[in-house]
Image (cartoon, rainbow, N blue to C red):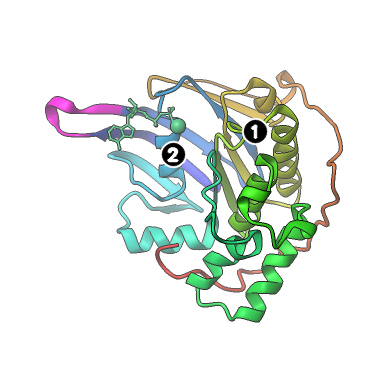
């Protein structure tokens, strides 16, 4: 298991205002899995993603990442883990509007102190992987929603993440762009990336191999395999497996804080 969570709770606020965002969550995710997390608004999906991605800590319970108990790591230790293993994609893309697609993908590498020539090359290659080779010098407002999200995905891949976490990545996209984004995740998954997608959209969820439902902070169902129908359409653009070197050891690790 790359992720092992057992009897985990997350509370926000103090006594009278205390919110139980997650309650006795137990969840195992094997390396190489692709799964969706579904549930109504306010059910705890983002809270769970933030904990999975080491942006936040559980209040109690076990969280083991790659077999190591990380529930008590400090902020710096969590940041190191995040930079080594985790990629994030958000509903609102979180791109810098005054930077080109290329500069947006380069940004985490700027923070990590990668030399300019090297980070240009890596960013170009990643934009090529997500099908945006001919849009590298465009600004976000010159790109469609689907293209913006693909820039964000390219940026999430710069640290060769073992786990890609996407919180409602298709929430602002039309059906067709959303499908392309999920197909891209599927391709990344097929070359070894563990993918966790939060979605409201059952059309998105059925494209993964496992669906975990959350309600009021609790897991109420966890289905996988043949009970989920798999759509087998082919990507609209070509991906070259191996180009990211996912099978190689991490070539560099980002510094704290990206
Ligand atoms: N930083 C926070 N402080 C206090 N309450 C929070 C915070 N973040 C989320 N919550 C509460 O925790 C619950 C779960 O929220 P969230 O994880 O964002 O749900 P979802 O992503 O499923 O919509 C909600 O009741 C929400 O209001
Ligand atoms: Mg949310």
Q: Quadrant of ligand 2?
A: top left
Q: Position of residue 193 (x, y in %)?
A: 66, 50
Q: Is residue 129 left or right of residue 165?
A: right
Q: Position of residue 154 (x, y in %)?
A: 65, 56
Relative vertical location of residue 155 with respect to residue 170 in this rendering, above or below: below
Residue 19 forms part of the magenta stretch:
yes
Relative vertical location of residue 253 with respect to residue 144 in this rendering, above or below: below
**CB at disc 1 and ligand 2 closer than 8 Å:** no
Q: Position of residue 39 (x, y in %)?
A: 50, 21
Q: Secondary structure at mark 1?
A: loop
Q: Nearer the viewer, mark 1 or mark 2?
A: 1
Q: Which residues are magenta?
A: 13-20
Mark 2: few/some/many CA within 10 Å (<14, 14-19, 20+):
many
Per the image, the residue denoted by label 1 is 173
What is the spatial separation of the Cα atoms under label 1 and label 2, in whole angstroms? 31 Å
Residue 214 forms part of the magenta stretch:
no
- Please name the residue shown 65% across and 38% down the image: 34
In what quadrant of the picture does the C terminus appear?
Answer: bottom left
Front residue (pair 219, 152): 152
- Please name the residue shown 64% across and 69% down the image: 249
Q: Secondary structure at mark 2?
A: strand
Q: Position of residue 46 (x, y in %)?
A: 44, 35
- Please name the residue shown 59% across and 55% down the image: 156
Q: Determine which quarter of the picture holds residue 16.
A: top left
Q: Determine which quarter of the picture holds residue 107.
A: bottom right
Residue extending furthest toward the left:
16
């Amino acid at each position: 298991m790359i992720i092992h969570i057992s009897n985990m709770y997350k509370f926000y606020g103090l006594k009278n205002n205390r919110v139980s965002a997650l309650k006795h969550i137990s969840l195992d995710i094997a390396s190489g899995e692709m799964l969706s997390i579904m549930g109504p608004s306010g059910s705890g999906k983002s809270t769970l993603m933030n904990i999975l991605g080491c942006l936040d800590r559980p209040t109690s319970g076990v969280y083991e990442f790659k077999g190591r108990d990380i529930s008590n790591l400090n902020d710096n230790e969590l940041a190191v883990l995040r930079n080594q293993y985790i990629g994030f994609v958000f509903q609102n893309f979180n791109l810098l509007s005054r930077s080109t697609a290329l500069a947006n993908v380069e940004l985490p590498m700027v923070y990590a102190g990668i030399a300019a020539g090297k980070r240009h090359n890596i960013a170009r290659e990643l934009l090529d992987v997500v099908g945006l080779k001919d849009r590298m010098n465009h600004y976000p407002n010159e790109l469609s929603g689907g293209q913006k999200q693909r820039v964000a995905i390219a940026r999430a891949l710069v640290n060769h993440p073992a786990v890609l976490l996407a919180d409602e990545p298709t929430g602002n996209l039309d059906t067709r762009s959303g499908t392309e984004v999920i197909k891209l995740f599927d391709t990344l998954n097929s070359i070894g990336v563990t993918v966790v997608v939060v979605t409201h959209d059952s059309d998105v969820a059925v494209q993964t191999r496992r669906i975990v439902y959350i309600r009021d902070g609790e897991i109420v169902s966890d289905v996988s395999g043949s009970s989920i129908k798999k759509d087998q359409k082919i990507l609209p653009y070509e991906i070259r497996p191996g180009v990211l070197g996912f099978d190689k050891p991490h070539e560099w690790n980002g510094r704290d804080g990206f």
